[in-house]
């Protein structure tokens, strides 16, 4: 005979009106049980509080939200608009078959719901090849290539469209897992940048990068999406199955049930107390940026990665054409 699950009633409903409404979520680190209504309010309160605490942006300035089509970025675009921020969406179609097509469709659906048309860039049209093709040409891991291409277009679209702030949907699991990985491997270069806000560089035309969901766990973001009927793609990227970050996120997920709030405390203590220690390495470790000689975008070298990719793709196509002619 199975044991009945104990019903937990919403903490806020009992406190406010002595109503006994079953909870939909447990916020273990705060000792809260929340119903649907109070969870949505709690979620939105913490997103706004995170924006204010780290001075990410204000209500007057427009924000460009990078939309992958997954739950995190889609929730971010939705909640920012609900809270009254001027948030526009930008989606990069990576050319990864059905996965990319589904992601773009979900982005367009959410745009219709909130009444805004997202900016959409197709990698295959812009560069001449999809992410899988580019990875083959460069014999490089797809995740590494993809991340750098994304950053290039985030910066470029923000500059061309006049946005000074770009927001991404990185969540607490992403940030805590990445922090653990970089601490274990002692990657000072990345630990320097491990903060919810990366400052803008007006000389180079780089926008400020912010992460308003940095204190929200994946499961709570998913619940918020479900309760608000936010469309999103649940298809995992077929090229990212071997990404090492999954290992470190899994380690923290195993610890979390036994030590409530360990991910949050681990991440917050670092950024509030210890991240400044790594800032002393910033001058020594920081990569010198310049303008790309071809496209004029910020780059660590005279020619940026995307322009190098375009040249390599053209070269590969020419070789294919010659081979076809000889055969």
Image (cartoon, grey):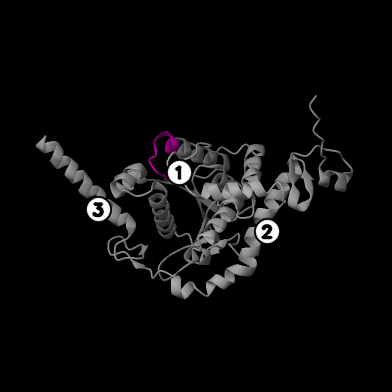
Q: Residue 106 at what x, y percent from top left?
A: 51, 37
Image height check: is 131 above or below 274? above
User: Magenta span covers which residues?
Assistant: 93-101
Q: Secondary structure at mark 2?
A: helix
**Count of picture labels:** 3
96 drawn magenta: yes
The image's mark for residue 303 is: none
CA neighbours of label 1 inside 10 A, class few (<14), some (14 to 19), many (20+) = some
Q: Which residue is mark 2?
A: 265
Q: Residue at x 76, y 45 (%)?
A: 38
Q: Is residue 125 visible?
A: no
Q: Secondary structure at mark 1?
A: loop
- Real-space CA distance between mark 1 and mark 2, rounded to the nearest whole angstrom: 28 Å
Image height check: is 2 above or below 217? above
User: Is 281 on the left or on the right of 10, as rendered?
Assistant: left
The image's mark for residue 240 is: 1
Q: Secondary structure at mark 3?
A: helix
- Real-space CA distance between mark 3 and mark 1, rounded to the nearest whole angstrom: 25 Å
CA neighbours of label 2 inside 10 A, class few (<14), some (14 to 19), many (20+) = few
Q: Residue 39 at what x, y percent from top left?
A: 73, 45
Numbered disc in front, either 3 or 1: 1
Question: Which residue lies most toward the right here?
Answer: 18
Of marks 3 and 1, which one's residue comes earlier in the chain? 1
Q: Which residue is mark 3?
A: 311
Q: Nearer the viewer, residue 28 or 213?
A: 28
User: Is 9 on the left or on the right of 180, as rendered?
Assistant: right
Q: Residue at x 48, y 72 (%)?
A: 282
Among the 4 quarters of the image, the one containing residue 239? top left
**Quadrant of the image for the C terminus?**
top left
Q: Residue 295 at what x, y percent from top left?
A: 31, 60
Numbered disc in front, either 2 or 3: 2
């Amino acid at each position: 005979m199975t044991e009945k699950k104990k019903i937990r009633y919403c903490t806020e409903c009992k406190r406010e009106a002595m109503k006994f409404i079953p909870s939909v979520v447990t916020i273990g680190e705060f000792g809260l049980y929340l119903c649907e209504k109070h969870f949505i309010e709690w979620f939105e309160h913490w997103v706004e509080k995170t924006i204010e605490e780290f001075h990410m942006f204000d209500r007057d300035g427009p924000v460009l939200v990078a939309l992958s089509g997954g739950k995190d970025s889609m929730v971010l675009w939705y909640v920012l608009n609900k809270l009254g921020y001027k948030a526009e969406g930008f989606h990069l179609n990576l050319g990864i078959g059905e996965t990319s097509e589904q992601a773009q469709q979900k982005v367009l659906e959410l745009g219709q719901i909130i009444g805004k048309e997202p900016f959409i860039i197709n990698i295959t049209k812009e560069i001449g090849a999809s992410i899988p093709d580019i990875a083959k040409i460069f014999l490089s891991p797809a995740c590494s290539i993809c991340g750098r291409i994304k950053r290039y277009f985030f910066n470029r679209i923000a500059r061309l469209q006049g946005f000074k702030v770009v927001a991404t949907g990185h969540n607490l699991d992403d940030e805590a897992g990445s922090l653990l990985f970089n601490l274990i491997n002692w990657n000072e270069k990345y630990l320097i940048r491990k903060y919810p806000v990366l400052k803008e560089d007006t000389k180079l035309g780089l926008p400020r990068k912010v992460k308003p969901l940095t204190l929200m766990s994946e499961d709570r973001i998913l619940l918020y999406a479900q309760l608000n009927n936010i469309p999103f793609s649940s298809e995992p990227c077929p090229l990212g199955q071997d990404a090492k970050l999954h290992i470190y996120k899994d380690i923290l997920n195993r610890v979390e049930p036994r030590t409530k709030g360990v991910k949050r405390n681990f991440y917050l203590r670092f950024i509030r107390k210890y991240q400044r220690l790594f800032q002393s390495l910033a001058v020594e470790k920081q990569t010198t940026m310049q303008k790309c000689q071809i496209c004029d975008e910020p780059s660590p070298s005279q020619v940026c990665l995307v322009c190098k990719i375009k040249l390599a793709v053209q070269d590969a196509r020419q070789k294919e054409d010659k081979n076809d002619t000889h055969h």
